[in-house]
Every structure is written in structure tokens, then in C-alpha cells.
Amino acid sequence: MFQRVQRTVDATLRTTMQMLPARWRIDRGSARVGATAVRPHLGTAALGVAGVLALAGRRVPATAAVAAGLVGTAPAVRRLSRRPPSSAAGGPVVTVLVANVLLGRADCTALAALIAAERPDLAVLPEAGAGYRDALLPLLDGYRGWSSVPPGVPEGRGTVVLAAPRAGDVEVRPGEGMRLPHLAVTGGLLGPRTLYAVHTSAPTDPRRLASWRDELALIGSWTRARPAPIVAGDLNAVLDHRRLRVALGGCRDVAEGTGHGAAGTFPSSWPRWAGIRIDHVLVPRRSSTHRYAVRELPGSDHRAVLVRVALPGQAPDGY
């Protein structure tokens, strides 16, 4: 019954978008993706409307608003109440930081202080290039850094990876297949696993929407490999997006089971409960989450995400 109602609401949303007047110059595909990103917010608003209608004695509209509200909020509630997954012991504990630095404008000193305090083994910085890396590294003790773009390329097109001494002798190589260049990290603390440092396209127009779909499909091909990888960065998608859920493959979102998955990471100017969570760390399904925290990052429109996970061992069933 619930699934039928959910399909009906989704179909209604798609139909509404398709009927938007052409003079509004709104790309309907992008509008659908955007509406899906705030579906829990719309569901909560519908429940509020239902309360107002009920007080006014409008029972039938109130009932309809309750049904729409439950459809909008139920998937998020299920995710938040889900128990932590069973884990497979034997793998290393890895701390990862994801921080979109807004075209290289985030406060270097504040970010360096966060890194110095938390000592992540690996940090992924979308919208950072060689210039931001070179400004940040002198503020850090023992970290090495790589940029996905060469000097002179705008910061917004790049992603930087930082590695602490504890990460060991990692190998960082450029990746292909995404509009914004990404990096692949292997070796050292990761062993045979790969950490992909990514920034997917924002699905704001038809061209970038197509790129977004292709890039999430590419991530899905990574997550179905063995051993399962870590994927960290700004995915420009929330778990209400079906394409992100499909892309999980043999991975899961590290926030699953922590009770903190509702904290929005974007935009940082909004309260956490009002934002959306588009900055993710995907980890092998049988990893154990030891910590999940969202941190403020002055100068950026994103909040940073800090996670600590125990990866599964390398036995055939632990990948």
C-alpha cells in the first residue's frame, strides 16, 4: 500500500514538472532532481499543512496532506532509524575528511586547524586546485597533497587529496570519466582498496544533468568492484535520489545507522535541519562506522564531514 502511494506521489510530481509553462525556462529534468533532493522537507511541510487543515475541520484534504507527508518523510525516517550494519573485523581503521572549499575560498587557517585537531588520514577537498593545496600544506605538519588539475586551472574544477603520515605510502593517480577531474588513491593504509576523491556535476541544466547521471553510473561501476572502494566527495545527490541509491553497489553511506544522517551539509548558511546532505563518504558495506561528524567550515557554502571507519578484512566475504 505504502509503495503504491509513494509511486503515485512521485508520478504526480513528474507530471507537474512536465506541465510547467515553457516561458518559465525551467529544465524539467533538473527541476525533478531538485524537488527530490528536498522531498523530506516537502513531506514535513505537508504534515504541517495537514495539521492546519485538521484544525479547520477540513478532514478530507487533511487526510490527503498526511498521506503526502508520510510518503515524503518515510524514506528518511527509515534511514535514520536503521540499525548499524553488521561489520567484518580485521581491516584497518581509516579517518576521512570531506570539505568542499568553494572555489578555493574557504578559510585556509580554519581548515588547517580542523585538520590539525582531527588528524584525518586522508582529506578530500572538492573545488580546490594546485593553488589552494600549496597555500594549505605549509600550515600542516607532515601532510602531502595532490591536485587533480595543474597550476593555472581554476580552483573550482579541481579536487585535492591530502594524506597524513599515518596513511603510509599511498599512490595517487588522476581518474577519467567525470567532467570535473577526480583522483584515485591506493596503497598504504588502504591496502588494495581504492579511495576515489570526486566532485560530480551539479544537475542544474540538461547538459550537466546528463553528466550527473553518467557520473553516478560510473561510481556504481566502482562500488561493484572487489575489493569495494571508498568514494568520498561532493556527490551533488542525496539518498532520496534513486540514482545514488543504485550507485551504492557493494558500499553504503557511512552515516547509515549513526542517527546523524539528517544533518545538512549544504548550504552552510542554512540550519543543519533545513539543508541537504550532498557531501558523502561511501564505504564497503561491511565496514563499521566509529564516528560521523559534521563540522563548520568558514568561507565555504558547504560543511565538512569527518568520518572514522573500520574497513572489513580482506577475506573473500569481507570485501
Image (cartoon, rainbow, N blue to C red):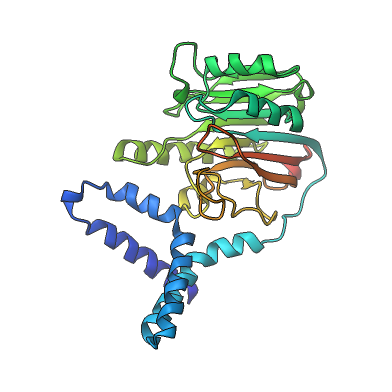
Q: What residue is rendered at 68% in x and 57% in y?
A: 259
Tell me the quadrant of the picture where the C terminus can be found. Answer: top right
Name the residue nearer the viewer: 32 or 11: 32
Q: Residue 134, position in %: x, y?
A: 59, 13
Residue 232 vs residue 181: left or right?
Answer: right
Q: Is residue 315 above or below residue 159?
A: below
Q: Is residue 93 above or below residue 130?
A: below
Q: What residue is rendered at 66% in x and 46% in y?
A: 254
Residue extending farthest to the top is 151
Q: Residue 130, position in %: x, y?
A: 54, 15
Residue extending farthest to the left is 23
Name the residue nearer the viewer: 219 or 315: 219
Q: Residue 117, position in %: x, y?
A: 76, 31
Name the residue nearer the viewer: 176 or 156: 156
Query: How many circles with numbers are drawn on the protein?
Result: 0
User: Is any part of residue 285 visible from this angle?
Assistant: yes
Q: Residue 42, position in %: x, y?
A: 43, 63
Q: Is residue 163 above or below residue 12?
A: above
Residue 4 image-quadrant placement: bottom left
User: Is any part of residue 192 visible from this angle?
Assistant: no
Q: What residue is rendered at 62% in x and 45% in y?
A: 250
Residue 188 vs residue 224: left or right?
Answer: right
Q: What residue is rendered at 51% in x and 39% in y?
A: 235
